[in-house]
Image: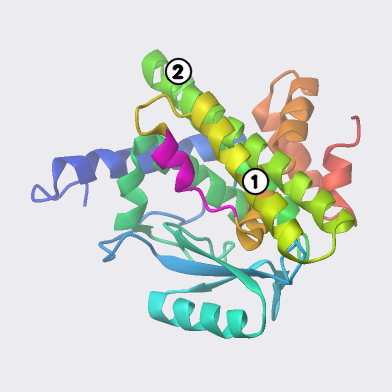
Amino acid sequence: MLEDETTAADVRESLSHVQDARHYARSLGLTIDGQYTTYVAWPGDRIITTVVATRPGEVEPAGFWFPILGTLPYKGFFDPERAGREAERLRRQGLDVCIVPVRAYSTLGWFDDPVTEPMLRGGTGALVETILHELVHATVYVREQIDFNEGVASFIGEEASVRFYQDRGEADAAAQRRQEVTDAHRIDAAILDFRERVIELYAAEPAGPDRDAARASAEQETRAAIAATVFETRDANQLSQGLRLNDACLALAATYTADLDRYARRLQQLDGDLSAFVARLIEVAQDPEPRDALLESQ
């Protein structure tokens, strides 16, 4: 694709970033093997559509069990219509459902995953983050520890994507990526705070109209807070209203973001050495409680 003169310039630039991100991942100690060395012009805006479900009055995933992988909070479908049918089946069982389009996935090193067209559509910064995130999965995956797997991959992907540009001497791109990550963390923090409020509400109040009204009020406060502090455009309110904050989506948000601040503090304790952080991650992967082992000095 890179050598083919008919390849569009924007695709060639993105694929060049993929190559560079792979090399950077290797320098951090991540396993790259043959990951992301091929390209598929996949149709649509996603590779898979994931479905997450929660039971009434809960903001923890009900979960789906798979051979080898164990229990995961989500179930993914290549066919969006099948995802929709699964969501309806779960709703008929009385569960709350979150449906999420996903641009990338990892087979955890079992196969050489391709770069796909939807991965290129979020811009080069997001693309680099995605490649680094997925390569963490190819390096370390702990069965039945999905919050740990996704949380640490999210942290490394975000932080490494900033340093990727810093180490290339692209100060403006690094600053932009840092701002994107910072804004994402502000949204994450507001959503996690709302999730805690929902947990407390469900524990204190029985199901019914009063609890529903209290939850709706707290949700609108959260949307207003996000619009005021993060989105700096005249469409801020519209953007914040587009966030999915139902119970199942809150459950999924915690899977990816609940421990980001703690991982950041652990990195500081390692003098900001991201390679040392990755090395420690690999060391603790066999520990019965890898998350606690990684964060042990806090």
Q: Residues within 10 Å of mark 1 (few under 14, many from 20)?
A: few
What residue lies at 69% left-to-right and 43% top-to-bottom? Answer: 194
Percent x, y of residue 237: 43, 36
Please tell me the numbered disc located at residue 217.
1
Quadrant containing the C terminus in the rendered view = top right
Specify whether residue 184 is in view. no
Residue drawn where x is 38% and y is 15% of the image: 172
Q: Is residue 23 magenta?
A: no
Kindly indicate the quadrant of the structure image that contains residue 122. Answer: top left
Task: Give the image location of residue 6, x and y in percent.
Answer: 8, 51
**Does 65 appear above or below 272?**
below
> What residue sits right under mark 2 in the picture?
175
Q: Where residue 203 sits in the image (x, y, percent)?
A: 87, 57
The amino acid type, in three-letter code, at marker 2 is Ala
Provide the residue span drawn in magenta.
237-245
Residue 239 is one of the magenta-drawn residues = yes
Marks 1 and 2, the one that precedes in the sequence: 2
Q: CA distance from mark 1 to mark 2?
A: 36 Å
Q: Residue at x 59, y 62 (%)?
A: 108
> Residue 36 appears at what percent x and percent y?
41, 54
Q: Circle 2: is it few (<14), some (14-19), or many (20+) Cα within 10 Å?
A: some
